[in-house]
């Protein structure tokens, strides 16, 4: 563990906040709000650009047993106000720090049942909120046994997974195969038919405010990885009655789960019987969803997180006037070696294109899109309507040409 301390001048009694995980947007907002930041990050993930934002860096893993004693020592001298993490692996350590030091943060019990998909299903069943069956499975026989009791199709996914990694859907007994080896357990549950959405909400002292409903696009043309998300749009292009049904469902869900404070990102499907939750997270959504929400609604999820952490506001009482819509689409070129890229500059200045990020270059290798981390770039667009924002993204992703070859360039063999 390497503590690096730095004085911050020109402040009178700034509030002290612990942040787990490098997050430039969060640190920038905390600094603007007048807070001093103690950043906890693994040495190999530390973003040196954050050095000018933070008072102190603690370079260690989030689960380092010496971390809490170190923070307790600092807390005794300059008391912390809150602890925040926007990274999935930092949520439970942050909750542990909050409860140990008695500062503002999330409950360990709540975070535990959101991080563990089996625990979430068990909790919802015990509370009478949802009767969806779920079981831990360790082999083909376990998956087939679950299907024999509850029917096909069956979803099998890591118990603590994220980013659509190692998610499989089996529609018949003959399709069932052993999932990839993993240190995590796998769970099985029924596959729910219907369009998928995520709900971006903010809560304070048990009061919930749904800020946006996000429409999802998945890699359905790839039968091997059909659940990888390749695009989002805010707001989802759905009827008002569907908005009302999802909003009512998620508010009740958050109550049942005990999620009383902070941002949440809840994924669900709208089935023929109504909304059914897939999973939830006590953080903002990934894939630039906070940017989409800000562009489309005017709500800034990171601002709200900071203001809640500093005990300055509760949930927003009014909804800003809708700014329109925003969408993101990821590039999904075929696998192979990149031999040419064209069109990025052509589309960079297209009206409505807010960001166009395509870091691939000649000589790079494109891997199959198996999860969120294997996508290669994206375009983010704004427009008056969801349909128009989606169309701008489609025009750009189809207009940029990424030429690939099955063989590596010379010197790469």
Image (tube, helix red, strand yellow):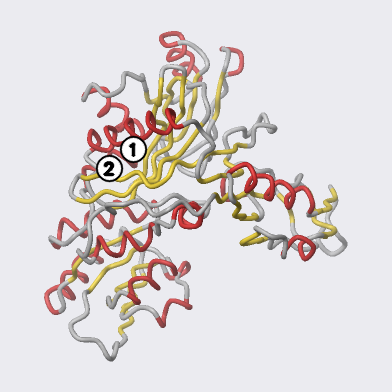
Q: Give residue 134's position: percent from left, percent from top.
A: 37, 22
Q: Give residue 66's position: percent from left, percent from top.
A: 24, 66
Q: Residues within 10 Å of mark 2 (few under 14, many from 20)?
A: some
Q: Rounded to the nearest whole Å, what is the CA distance between mark 2 and mark 1? A: 6 Å
On screen, residue 195 versus residue 90, left or right, reads right
Q: Nearer the viewer, residue 42 or 16?
A: 16
- Which residue: 46% across, 57% down? 294
**Can you say whether 21 is above or below 157 in the image?**
below
- Which residue: 27% across, 32% down? 252
**Can you say whether 168 is above or below 172 in the image?**
below
Q: Identify the residue at the far right of this view.
A: 410
**Can you say whether 24 is above or below 179 in the image?**
below
Image quadrant occupied by the N terminus: bottom left
Q: Based on the displayed image, in which of its 4 quarters is residue 169 positioned?
A: top right
- Which residue: 42% across, 24% down? 137
Q: Nearer the viewer, residue 69 or 244?
A: 244
Image quadrant occupied by the C terminus: bottom right
Q: Give residue 130's position: percent from left, percent from top.
A: 31, 22
- Which residue: 47% across, 68% down? 44
**Can you say whether 48 is above or below 400 in the image?**
below
Q: Give residue 334's position: percent from left, percent from top.
A: 76, 44
On screen, residue 195 versus residue 93, left or right, reads right
On screen, residue 242 versus residue 353, left or right, reads left
Q: Identify the residue at the far top of this view.
A: 148
Helix, strand or loop under label 1: loop
Helix, strand or loop under label 2: helix
Residue named by callout 1 = 116
Residue named by callout 2 = 112
């Amino acid at each position: 563990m390497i503590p690096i301390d730095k004085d911050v001048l020109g402040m009178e009694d700034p509030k002290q906040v612990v942040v787990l995980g490098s997050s430039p947007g969060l640190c920038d907002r905390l600094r603007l709000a007048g807070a001093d930041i103690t950043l906890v990050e693994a040495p190999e993930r530390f973003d040196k650009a954050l050095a000018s934002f933070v008072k102190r860096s603690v370079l260690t893993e989030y689960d380092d047993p010496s971390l809490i004693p170190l923070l307790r020592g600092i807390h005794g001298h300059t008391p912390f106000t809150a602890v925040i993490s926007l990274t999935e692996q930092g949520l439970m350590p942050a909750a542990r720090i909050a409860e140990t030091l008695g500062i503002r943060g999330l409950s360990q019990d709540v975070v535990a049942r959101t991080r563990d998909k089996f625990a979430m299903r068990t909790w919802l069943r015990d509370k009478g909120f949802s009767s969806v069956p779920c079981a831990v499975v360790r082999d083909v026989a376990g998956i087939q046994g679950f299907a024999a009791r509850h029917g096909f199709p069956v979803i099998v996914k890591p118990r603590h997974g994220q980013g659509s990694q190692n998610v499989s859907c089996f529609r018949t007994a003959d399709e069932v195969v052993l999932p990839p080896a993993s240190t995590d357990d796998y769970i099985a549950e029924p596959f729910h038919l219907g369009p998928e959405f995520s709900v971006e909400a903010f809560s304070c002292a048990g009061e919930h405010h749904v800020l946006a409903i996000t429409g999802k696009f998945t890699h359905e043309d790839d039968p091997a990885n059909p659940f990888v998300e390749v695009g989002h749009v805010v707001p989802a292009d759905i009827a008002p009655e569907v908005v009302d049904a999802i909003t009512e469902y998620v508010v009740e869900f958050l109550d049942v789960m005990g999620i009383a404070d902070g941002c949440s990102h809840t994924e669900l499907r709208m089935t023929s019987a109504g909304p059914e939750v897939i999973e939830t997270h006590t953080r903002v959504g990934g894939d630039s969803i906070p940017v989409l929400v800000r562009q489309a609604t005017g709500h800034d999820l990171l601002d709200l997180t900071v203001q809640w952490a500093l005990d300055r506001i509760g949930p927003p009482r009014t909804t800003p006037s809708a700014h329109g819509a925003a969408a993101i689409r990821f590039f999904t070129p075929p696998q192979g070696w990149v031999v040419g890229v064209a069109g990025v500059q052509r589309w960079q200045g297209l009206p409505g294109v807010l960001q166009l990020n395509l870091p691939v270059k000649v000589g790079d290798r494109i891997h199959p899109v198996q999860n969120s981390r294997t996508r290669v770039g994206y375009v983010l667009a704004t427009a008056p309507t969801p349909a128009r924002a989606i169309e701008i993204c489609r025009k750009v992703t189809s207009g940029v040409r990424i030429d690939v070859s099955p063989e590596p360039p010379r010197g790469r063999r």
